[in-house]
Amino acid sequence: MVVSLRRRTQATNPRSDLPRSLAADDSDSELDTVCEECSSGKQPAKLLLCDKCDKGFHLFCLRPILVSVPKGSWFCPSCSQHQIPKSFPLVQTKLIDFFRIKRGPDSTSPDSSIGKKRKRTSLVMSKKKRKLLPYIPTVDPQRRLEQMASLATALRASNTEFRNELTYVSGKAPRSDNKAVLEKGGMQVLSKQDAETLALCKNMMDRGECPPLMVVFDPYEGFTVEADRCIKDLTIITEYVGDVDYLSNREDDYDGDSMMTLLHASDPLQCLVICPDKRSNIARFISGINNHTPEGRKKQNLKCVRFNINGEARVLLVANRDISKGERLYYDYNGYEHEYPTEHFV
């Protein structure tokens, strides 16, 4: 099979035909450019060339991986010279404004409300019937400020506006098209008690009681998220949010940020995705995982779950086991193989 290789800056559409003069066989021996990470020249259609040094990198060898060819100029990790982003000011008033925190009297904490109800629950209840748990905020107010400042730093560095709910923007999919009933094969309905738990988590975030998470900058992987205290199995970490759009609008022009399946309908034109590149929350910085290998499944500590909530599709990130303090968070994409190449995730 003959495939093509060309300058990265010309690759505005990875599916388009390429100049015959730049064609090459799909073999290591007949390619001048090889991937700097795996030393292979195979799959040249997925081999990016740095716009500065001309070195090649497979989409799936980069960390984080790229789902598709980015638009515009692209520079390899060495040429981009990643530097630690400037930290967001650790000033309470600035954080309150950034996250639009609602000021008011403290509400009931999860320990004193839902926690008491759960003490009456039988301990022999099967895991399948167990209910979702609210996250437990860090008690120390100063540490909570540091957690929120870490998220604000990442959002500002990526030019992302903070939102803690799905957003519907003119020119993309309207909210009226988010109908869970269209899900192919059906979608599980979030129970009343779990819906109350989710609402509690939302209310805590509105008050500035954020999940016990810290966004850290890794020069190799970029922004990632770590647990800042022990988190129990089945704890709601966050909702996956961003702009809602049709999958058909994003198949060719999406530049690599983490899309998430929201609605997988029988009609391809009704399929919806969540795009966190403009507006999102901490979910944008939680890493996907290769759950096709035993090592990946062992490393995975979050599960993506889609629910029907009041007739609309929503995506929650939920702990699928106990998570230790300092452990990096990884979740599985709930999409399909042609949409998310999770076999390449670390």
Image: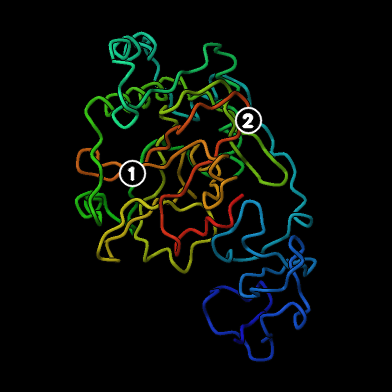
Q: Label 2 sits on what residue type?
A: Phe
Q: Residue at x 62, y 60 (%)?
A: 60
When the figure is inspected, residue 1 is found, relative to residue 267, above or below; the finding is: below
Q: Secondary structure at mark 1?
A: strand
Q: Are marks 1 and 2 in contact (CB under 8 Å)?
A: no
| Residue placed furthest toward the bottom | 20
Place of residue 158 in the rendered image (x, y in percent of width and height, measured from the top left) = 58, 45
Q: Answer with mark 1 or mark 2, whichever residue precedes in sequence.
A: 2
Q: Residue at x 42, y 27 (%)?
A: 235
Asked where in the image residue 183 lies, by quadrant, the reply is bottom left
Query: Label 2 belongs to which residue?
Result: 88
Place of residue 207 in the rendered image (x, y in percent of width and height, measured from the top left) = 41, 20
Q: Label 1 sits on what residue type?
A: Arg
Place of residue 31 in the rendered image (x, y in percent of width and height, measured from the top left) = 75, 80
Q: Residue at x 51, y 36 (%)?
A: 301
Tell me if mark 2 has few (under 14), some (14-19) or many (20+) residues whose alpha carbon lies within 10 angstroms of its own. some
Q: Secondary structure at mark 2?
A: loop
Query: Label 1 belongs to which residue?
Result: 306
From the viewer's perspective, tell me whether residue 272 is left or right of residue 329.
left
Place of residue 338 in the rendered image (x, y in percent of width and height, measured from the top left) = 45, 65
From the viewer's perspective, tell me whether residue 163 is left or right of residue 123.
right
| Residue placed furthest toward the front | 124
The quadrant of the picture occupied by the N terminus is: bottom right
Q: Nearer the viewer, residue 85 or 190?
A: 190
Tell me if mark 1 has few (under 14), some (14-19) or many (20+) residues whose alpha carbon lies within 10 angstroms of its own. many
From the viewer's perspective, tell me whether residue 34 is left or right of residue 232.
right
State which mark lies toward you, 1 or 2: 1
From the viewer's perspective, tell me whether residue 114 is left or right of residue 156.
left
Q: Residue at x 61, y 39 (%)?
A: 224
